[in-house]
Image (cartoon, rainbow, N blue to C red):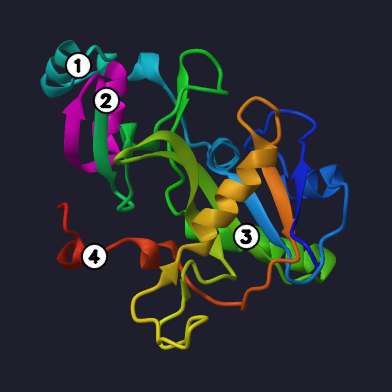
Amino acid sequence: MSLQIIPLHLKHDIRPVDDLVELLLSSSKTTFENGDVLVISQKIISKHEGRTVNLELIIPSELSIGIASAYGKDPKLVEAILSESKRIVRMDHGVIIVQTKHGFICANAGIDESNVECGYATLLPKDSDKSAQQIRLKILQQTGKKIAVIISDTFGRPFRIGQTDHAIGVAGIDPILHYEGTPDTFGKILRVTATAIVDELCSAAELVMGKTKKCPAAIIKNFNFKENTGNIQSIIRSKEEDLFR
């Protein structure tokens, strides 16, 4: 069967008091089946978990003021970025690339001012794996169906123009599909091939979710995967293996 990607539209902007799973179930054009993959945007998870910040209430440090002045940024936003970061990786062309407390390398620590009330910004969820697992378990309780859940966010890419969606949290699926030890079409044994399937699924889902369609989630059907208890940390390259750190 061919892959199906079904967009899910929410009736209104998500709030912390809302039942996110109930909204997803009520908005679905189809029912969940065992083996489906639910991809949900980070923005909705952050809003639901109260991970929004009023930038006007932030008091920037001298460091934030200095960086903001040098790189044409809002010092309050810079302070928020630094508070969510382990280290600064690179600053140039008005862009601040950091390593977040989760270990992700991304611009502005994943802090985003789009699709949120003016003057506010969303922060990344504190534990996206936990968020994905809670959603997965609640869907199992309400529907009896075992699915995988992936939380996605949009990241830029070094050496290439344009952004793609990446997984920042998973439940019920291994982030990596390993081919090591299996023969290719010519019978040669593969040694290092490992496909980041959760990132590929996020990018596929983004094609129907978009950024302006008020569609924060999608169901992917007919994708064959093995149920697994993997977590997002398994997709982050270790310092010892990183040629660019």
Whether residue 17 is visible to the viewer of this picture, yes or no, is no
Does the magenta run of residues contain 144?
no
Whether residue 5 is visible to the viewer of this picture, yes or no, is yes
Of 166 and 75, which appears nearest the observer? 166
Alpha carbon of mark 1 to alpha carbon of mark 3: how far?
37 Å
What's the mark number on residue 71? 1
Residue 96 shown left or right of residue 62 in the figure: right
Residues shaded magenta: 76-95
| CB within 8 Å, label 1 to label 2 | yes
Q: Give amino acid for label 1.
A: Tyr
Alpha carbon of mark 1 to alpha carbon of mark 2: how far?
7 Å
Residue 119 screen position, x and y as percent = 46, 14
Q: Give amino acid for label 2.
A: Val
Q: Residue at x 88, y 53 (%)?
A: 30
User: Which residue corresponds to mark 3?
Assistant: 149
Residue 67 shown left or right of residue 204 in the figure: left
Question: Which secondary structure, mark 1?
Answer: helix
Q: Residue at x 62, y 77 (%)?
A: 227
Alpha carbon of mark 4 to alpha carbon of mark 1: how far?
30 Å
Question: Which secondary structure, mark 3?
Answer: strand
First-in-chain label (4 vs 2): 2
| CB within 8 Å, label 1 to label 3 | no
User: Which residue corresponds to mark 2?
Assistant: 95
Alpha carbon of mark 2 to alpha carbon of mark 3: how far?
31 Å
Residue 118 screen position, x and y as percent = 52, 13
First-in-chain label (1 vs 3): 1
Q: Residue furthest front?
A: 186
Specify few, some or many for label 3: CA neighbours under 10 Å numbering under 14, 14-19, or 20 or more. many
